[in-house]
Image (spheres, grey):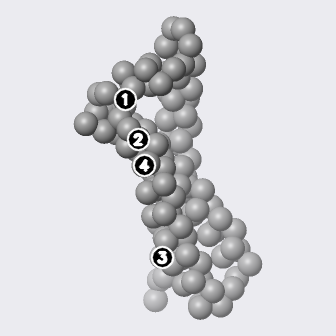
């Protein structure tokens, strides 16, 4: 029996890593170089008024959370724990990821229409 369940987290780790490089470079460019003048609540609100930038920030948040938590999970699994610890780690990372996403979305809440 070919067990390739570990292939998908490994592949998604690489894909999210590449996407993070692109998204973070774009984020830094927009927040530090494209906006002339000081970064204020008003300039951020104007940028996030459009759905493209809100979705961009949501995607960046999702990528960071997945990449970070999956990386921690992979490190834990490198120690070859038993099945119970593997499942506990997966469930713990899923719950933590959901909580971090909800917490991160609170930062975009003032800009929702």
Left or right placement of residue 82 versus residue 50 in this view:
right
Q: Earlier in the sequence, mark 4 or mark 1?
A: 1
Residue linked to disc 1? 48
Residue at disc 3, secondary structure: loop
Is label 2 or label 3 in front?
2
Q: Residues within 10 Å of mark 1 (few under 14, many from 20)?
A: some
**Callout 4–callout 1 Cβ contact below 8 Å:** no
Q: Earlier in the sequence, mark 2 or mark 3?
A: 3
Q: Earlier in the sequence, mark 1 or mark 2?
A: 1
**Callout 3–callout 4 Cβ contact below 8 Å:** no
Q: Earlier in the sequence, mark 3 or mark 4?
A: 3
Residue at disc 2, secondary structure: loop
Give the numbered dot on residue 58.
Answer: none
Foreground: 65 or 3?
65
Residue at disc 4, secondary structure: helix
Foreground: 88 or 38?
38
Question: Distance from label 1 to label 2 (Cα)?
Answer: 8 Å
Q: Which residue: 47% across, 83% down?
A: 2
**Callout 1–callout 2 Cβ contact below 8 Å:** yes
Give the numbered dot on residue 108.
Answer: 2
Residue linked to disc 3? 5
Residue 100 seen anywhere in this rendered image of the structure: yes
Question: Distance from label 2 to label 3 (Cα)?
Answer: 34 Å
Q: Which residue: 65% across, 90% down?
A: 82
Question: Distance from label 4 to label 1 (Cα)?
Answer: 13 Å
Residue at disc 1, secondary structure: helix
Residue 63 seen anywhere in this rendered image of the structure: no
Q: Residues within 10 Å of mark 4 (few under 14, many from 20)?
A: some
Give the numbered dot on residue 105.
Answer: 4
């Amino acid at each position: 029996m070919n067990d390739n369940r570990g292939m998908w987290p490994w592949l998604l780790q690489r894909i999210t890593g590449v996407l993070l490089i692109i998204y973070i470079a774009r984020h830094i460019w927009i927040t530090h170089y494209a906006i002339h003048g000081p970064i204020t609540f008003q300039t951020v609100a104007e940028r996030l008024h459009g759905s493209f930038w809100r979705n961009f920030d949501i995607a960046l948040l999702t990528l960071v959370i997945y990449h970070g938590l999956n990386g921690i999970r992979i490190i834990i699994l490198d120690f070859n724990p038993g099945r119970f610890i593997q499942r506990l780690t997966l469930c713990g990372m899923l719950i933590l990821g959901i909580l971090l996403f909800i917490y991160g979305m609170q930062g975009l809440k003032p800009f929702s229409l």
